[in-house]
């Protein structure tokens, strides 16, 4: 019981680190710690397959995908944080989180619940039991999660194209404006020609 409490505290600490870290990479590292603590909890509950899958799939493959997305989002961006849209939102978020935490702890103390002494079902947490769930009636949920992850990765690529593609788009736009100005018989505006030079220099 003491081990479960320690692992629970580590998992909560990792989750808090995910939302409080200023750098996305640090948040990803805190998430790895949270996933490892959950894997140990699964291992203590005699769900060996879930524990191994938690480490290999989530702390391994899924975290690589997260870091890939973080790299795309932060490429060429400034290190300083943008100004907040709502003044004091961090302070209010902290206050609300503390209040919610106090309420949850008070409810847990007031309603501790009874200990469940029920035998584990057959094939609990092993490969056979998980396989029947994933490839049985719950297969549609597995496909939905795969589509969601793929859509998220494609959305990042569409919303945040690589820097070189943005430079090429600026150069093509500047060339199109220059052709339009030449076809109209007028000189290229100074601001537009300057933008074209900046796009070529970038």
Image (cartoon, rainbow, N blue to C red):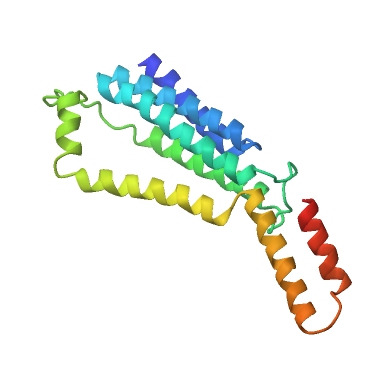
| Left or right: 77 in relation to 31 | right
Rendered residue at 37%/29% (across/down): 57
Say which residue appears at 53% left-offset and 42% top-offset. 69
Does 170 sit above or below residue 143? below
Q: Quadrant of residue 37?
A: top left
Q: Residue at x 78, y 84 (%)?
A: 184
Left of 21 or right of it: where is 175? right
Q: Decide: is 152 above or below 111.
A: below
Residue in the picture at 74% in, 45% down = 78
Tell which of 77 and 80 is nearer to you. 77
Residue reaching furthest to the bottom: 184
User: Is 88 displayed left or right of 117 in the figure?
Assistant: right
Q: Nearer the viewer, residue 145 or 75?
A: 75
Query: Is residue 98 visible to us here?
Result: no
Residue 178 coordinates in the image, percent (x, y): 77, 72
Image label count:
0
Residue lying furthest left: 122
- Quadrant assignment for the N terminus: top left
Q: Is residue 43 above or below residue 201?
A: above
Determine if residue 5 is in view. Answer: yes
Question: Where is residue 7 shown, x and y percent of the image?
Answer: 43, 21
**From this viewpoint, which residue is outermost toward the top?**
2
- Residue 90: where, in percent of width, then height? 66, 48
Residue 197: quadrant of the picture: bottom right
Depicted 99 relative to depicted 168: above or below:
above
Front residue of 185/105: it is 185
Query: Where does the image place residue 187, in percent across and percent down from the top left?
Result: 86, 78
């Amino acid at each position: 019981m003491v081990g479960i409490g320690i692992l629970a505290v580590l998992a909560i600490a990792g989750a808090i680190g995910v939302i409080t870290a200023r750098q996305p990479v640090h948040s990803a590292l805190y998430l790895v710690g949270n996933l490892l603590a959950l894997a140990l909890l699964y291992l203590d509950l005699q769900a060996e397959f879930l524990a191994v899958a938690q480490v290999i799939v989530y702390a391994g493959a899924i975290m690589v995908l997260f870091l890939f997305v973080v790299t795309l989002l932060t490429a060429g961006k400034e290190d300083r944080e943008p100004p907040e849209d709502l003044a004091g939102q961090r302070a209010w978020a902290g206050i609300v989180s503390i209040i919610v935490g106090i309420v949850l702890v008070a409810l847990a103390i007031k309603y501790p619940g009874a200990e469940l002494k029920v035998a584990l079902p057959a094939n609990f947490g092993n490969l056979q039991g998980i396989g029947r769930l994933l490839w049985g009636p719950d297969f549609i949920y597995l496909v939905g999660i795969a589509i969601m992850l793929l859509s998220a990765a494609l959305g990042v690529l569409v919303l945040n194209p690589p820097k070189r593609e943005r430079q090429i788009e600026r150069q093509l736009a500047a060339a199109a404006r220059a052709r339009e100005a030449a076809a109209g018989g007028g000189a290229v505006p100074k601001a537009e020609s300057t933008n074209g030079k900046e796009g070529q220099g970038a």
